[in-house]
Structures are given as C-alpha cells and as structure tokens.
Amino acid sequence: MDYLEATYYFDYESDEIQKIIREFNTDTLTPKEKATRLYLKIRDDWWYDPYHINLSKEGYRASKIAKKNSGHCLDKSILLISCLRALRIPARIHLAKVKNHIGVERLIEKFGTNELTPHGMVNICLDGKWLKASPAFNKALCEKCNVAPLEFDGEQDSMFQEYDNKGGVFMEYLEDYGHFDDVPFDFMLNNMKEHYSNIINIYEGQTEIRL
C-alpha cells in the first residue's frame, strides 16, 4: 500500500480538490513545504464544527467537504489526505477517542459527554517517516479558547496540546484506534452509535446530524 491512490472518499481527481492544491502543485516547493503549507490551509480555511455530523458515505467525500466552509475533524482530515495524495505525498486517516476540557458546556449539552469519538487526524509520510498531524482546530478558534494554534513542521508529530496557555488541561487522548487505508465508514458509524446512541437514534434514517 503506497497511500497515494484516489478512492471514493479521497477523490482528488475532482475539480474541487484540484482547485485547492493548485498553488502547491509546483516543483519549486519540496514535499515538506507542500505538506506544511497545505496543513495550515486546511486548518484555517475550514472552521471547526463538531455539531454537524454526516451519516452517509457521500458526506465524507473530499470533493463534497471542499465545497463547505466548515468541517468536523473527520471532514478536515479527509480533505487534507486527499490534497496530500493529489500532490503525491503518502497520507492515511488515523482515528482516536479524545476528551476535551475547554469550552465543553455545549458539547456536554449536545452529546451528553465531553469525549469525542471517533476523532480524525492524518498520518503523513515525509522523508520516509510517518508523522501525525491534527488540522481540526482553526487558528481563530484556538485564540478564542486561549490555546496556541497547533502547528506542523513536517518533522515532528502535531498532536493536540495537553494544556492551554494558562497550564489548564486542554485535551486528553483516551484511546487509539489506529490508521486505515481508506475512510472506514462502517467503523466510524458503529463507533458513533456505540458512544452517542441517544443522538443517532433520533436521526435514524437521515443523512446528517445538525445539533
């Protein structure tokens, strides 16, 4: 597996994805420069929104996500992976369960918990080394929550910060589900049903959840 191919979800041959990568698709940039600049674009140009969740396969296609101005961590990870693969940089999706400790009132109200699952992040292969990158939280949101924006330098893993700017607990990684060759839709849906059954049951038969 070279993690470069297009799939139903990572449909990078689409016009939407080709438009995003146009500025990076040049021999004047190294793969590391392309990856780090693209990471920032996906991180900041799509506002993080955990309250809009897709329940259909179509909703997780990169070309469809690209048309929106916001996205869940899964959405933004899929978008970044598709763009990286389009630039011939190996990338794959990685899932986990995390616990958020900042600004959780609405999360708890809507989800009944401040545990988020499955949380999506990206594995990127640069210089023969697999790195983790988390493009979920845009810069403006981080500043609002008093958390330093998460950077990616193409050399170190870029994981959610454990503490905020004042030393308070920000994010915990509770469980690692590992990486997948393609978007594991059935796994994600079953995971949501297991952890948020009260919500999923309400929206059964619908294609998306808006909380």
Image (cartoon, rainbow, N blue to C red):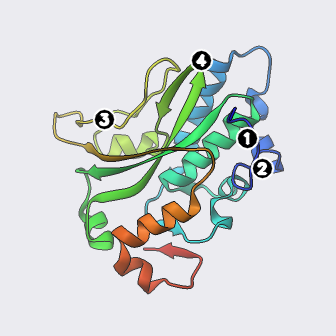
Q: Which mark is residue 16?
A: 2
Q: Name the residue located 80 percent from the left edge and 16 percent from the top edge.
A: 27
N-term mark: 2 or 3: 2
Q: Which mark is residue 128?
A: 4
Quarter occupied by the N terminus: top right
Cα separation, mark 2 vs mark 4, equals 29 Å
- CB of mark 2 within 8 Å of CB of mark 1? yes
User: Three-letter amino acid code at disc 2?
Assistant: Glu
On the image, numbered disc 3 is attached to which residue?
161
Q: Name the residue located 52 percent from the left edge and 40 percent from the top edge.
A: 43
Instruction: State the residue in front, 39 or 31.
Output: 31
- CB of mark 3 within 8 Å of CB of mark 1? no
Give SS at disc 4.
loop
- CB of mark 1 within 8 Å of CB of mark 4? no
Q: Position of residue 5 (x, y in %)?
A: 76, 40
Task: Report the mark closest to the observer, 4 or 3.
Answer: 4
Q: Name the residue located 18 percent from the left edge and 41 percent from the top edge.
A: 169
User: Three-letter amino acid code at disc 4?
Assistant: Gly
Instruction: State the residue in front, 25 or 98.
Output: 98
Cα separation, mark 1 vs mark 4, equals 25 Å
